[in-house]
Image (spheres, rainbow, N blue to C red):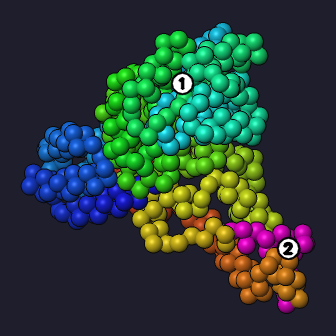
Amino acid sequence: MFESITESFEKIFSKMSGRGRLTEQNISEGLREVRVALLEADTNYKVVKDFIQKVTEKAVGEEVLKSVKPGQQIVKIVQTEMEHLMGPVDSTIKYVDGDITVIMLVGLQGSGKTTTAGKLANMILAKGKSPMLVAADVQRPAAIDQLKIIGRQLNIPVYSEKGSNPVKICKWAVKRAFLDNHNVVILDTAGRLHVDEYLMLELKQIKEKVKPTQIFFVCDSMTGQDAVNSAKEFNAQLDFDGVILTKLDGDTRGGAALSIKAVTGKPIKFVGVGEKFDKLEEFHPDRMASRILGMGDVVSLVEKAQQVIGEEEAVKLEKKIRANTLTLEDFLSQLQQVKKMGPMKDILGMIPGLGKKMKGVDIDENQLQRVEAMIRSMTLEERMNPDKIEGSRRHRISCGSGTNAHEVGQLLKQFKQMKKMFRSLSGINARNLPMEGMTPEAMKISRKIRSKRKKVKRKKR
């Protein structure tokens, strides 16, 4: 995600951090490069101009000029302004108490509205609501069938009518939802390849007759300025309430994410980060700014881990690591949990300082499946006691997993090395760990925590 712009920013900040002190001249030179990076990311020109102006006003000051580490100050200023550019946080859905909440999805054809309708319904279902999907796209061939398939996969009802117009379909869908005790209705409306009068007239009629609680504009983030321009037009015609960015996991530039809030004045509500129905996430400007600037996203990483790994299980694993009793059975369990969190490259990219080291490194996701196959081909006794796996056992395991004896041997060797590394890490004091990739504020907080822990230890003595 955002590989191109992240790489540009890392080069710029690395160059600026090498300077002893900042002056108006080298600030201007650095921000000129920032301007180019943003424009190359397909960010709106006016947005870039305003952004650079605000950063310049804050950067050229006594506090920055006297800073010991001026490069970090510039990073912080850029990060803060980037958060303001995409924020504030507003991932709320305004539900109507005691009545039906109607959410209308609009956007161009191919933006991912139908799939997003399913993802949004799945998210709402997880919050204890009872959603119903409405197939109001009668223009695109197979649009209704696609939504019905999504509905069956999620076990969510889909309302549709043959030979009717979208306005009537939406009106009767709300009535059907009332009869069937559904409290949320999601309207999947038609899109076009371009913004035209007929499309807008149809959408305006739905808005006028059905009176949706909220209207969300769904747009493909990979289209950059095209997405921003269409968002501006849709907002002028419909005055929507928020934006859902799709295909963000494949967006290397980030121009749409950086521009759309500033241009429309409407918040980015959610982002699609994968094809599966659980890959719709709330949008957090601060986390997105950190990722764009190559500083990782620890908060999102922790949240992903919490979703798949229970607290009790995490405590048990920590005890085993400390006692050096980790087995291949434990490793298999953790491997399955990690797979649920998403692609390995995305997970590693969330770790501060590690993203830039991953450039050019090809992570073979299939290798994880091979490792899992090898462990599953072992008996429980072999998983608990890997040292027992010798010649004949290795041959049997390799045959059962479709690998070779050498790969089995490599797995066992790497597992031993991992246990050895864990044993050495368990004795490391936190104050000796590197702080690369941390913002100045994060460093201050970390120092305060260590200071407080020392005081607590002194009191106990």
The label number, if any, that marks residue 377 in the structure image: 2
Does residue 72 appear left or right of residue 409 in this picture?
left
Observer-nearest of 230 and 86: 230
In this view, 300 is above or below 320: above
Q: Is residue 371 magenta?
A: yes
Does residue 260 appear left or right of residue 135 in this picture?
left
Residue at the farthest left position: 25
- Report the residue at 22% width, 55% height from top: 36
Mark 1: few/some/many CA within 10 Å (<14, 14-19, 20+): many
Q: Mark 1 = which residue?
A: 104
The label number, if any, that marks residue 399 in the structure image: none
Task: Tell me where residue 221 appears, x and y as whole percent.
Answer: 43, 45
Measured in 3D between alpha carbons, the distance from the residue under mark 1 to the one under mark 2, in whole angstroms, is 50 Å
Does residue 366 appear left or right of residue 442 in this picture?
right
Q: Which residues are magenta?
A: 368-391
Task: Tell me where residue 198 appears, x and y as whole percent.
Answer: 43, 26
Element class at badge 1: strand
Residue at the farthest bottom position: 391
Q: Would residue 444 be seen by someone viewing this image from the given angle?
A: no
Q: Amino acid at mark 2?
A: Ser
Task: Tell me where residue 311 appears, x and y as whole percent.
Answer: 71, 45
Q: Is residue 269 magenta?
A: no
Residue at the farthest top position: 98
Q: Main secondary structure of the magenta part?
A: helix
How many labels were placed on the picture?
A: 2
Q: Would residue 199 be seen by someone viewing this image from the given angle?
A: yes
- Report the residue at 14% width, 57% height from top: 29
Does residue 81 appear left or right of residue 409 in this picture?
left
In this view, 204 is above or below 244: above
Element class at badge 2: loop
Q: Quadrant of residue 420?
A: bottom right
